[in-house]
Amino acid sequence: MRQEAAGGEQAAVGVDTERHPLENGLAVAAITIGVAALILGSIPATHFFGAVAAVIGLPLALYSQLISATTNERWLNVVGMVAAFIGGAFALSHGGFTI
């Protein structure tokens, strides 16, 4: 016969019920800066700012991936990482760090 837990409802197996404010914040920052690098790097007039955003966004996304705790955070980190890399490549093709 099955016994119910004294605490009431139980969490599903594999579901993380803890909060991760640092990890979530870094993941959101990584994707935001990565998309900004992609947009700024693809516009020839803003290539310098795109290159700077890529230099900031790629290491941030890598560090955020290192400490991520959930799959959703990892998805955001990878998308931000790829966006920062491609944005940096666009920025370098338009002139990179030259003003």
Image (cartoon, rainbow, N blue to C red):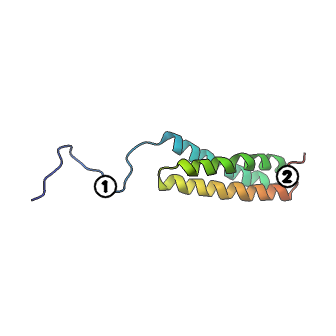
**Residue at point 13%, 53% (across, down):** 3
Tell which residue pokes out farthest to the left in this image: 1
Tell which residue pokes out farthest to the top in this image: 21
Quadrant containing the C terminus in the rendered view: top right
**Residue at point 83%, 51% (across, down):** 47
Q: Which residue bears the numbered disc 1?
A: 12
CA separation, marks 1 and 2?
49 Å
The residue tagged with tag 2: helix, strand or loop? loop
Q: Position of residue 35 (x, y in %)?
A: 68, 52
Quadrant containing the N terminus in the rendered view: bottom left
**Quadrant hosting residue 42:** bottom right
The answer to whether residue 33 is seen in the rendering is no
Residue 13 appears left or right of 4? right
Q: Position of residue 70 (x, y in %)?
A: 47, 52
Tell which residue pokes out farthest to the front in this image: 66
Residue 58 appears left or right of 23? right
**Quadrant hosting residue 81:** bottom right
The residue tagged with tag 1: helix, strand or loop? loop
Disc 2 crowd rating (10 Å Cα; few below 14, some 14-19, many 20+) is: many
Disc 1 crowd rating (10 Å Cα; few below 14, some 14-19, many 20+) is: few
**Residue at point 13%, 57% (across, down):** 2
Q: Position of residue 39 (x, y in %)?
A: 74, 53
Q: Position of residue 22 (x, y in %)?
A: 52, 40
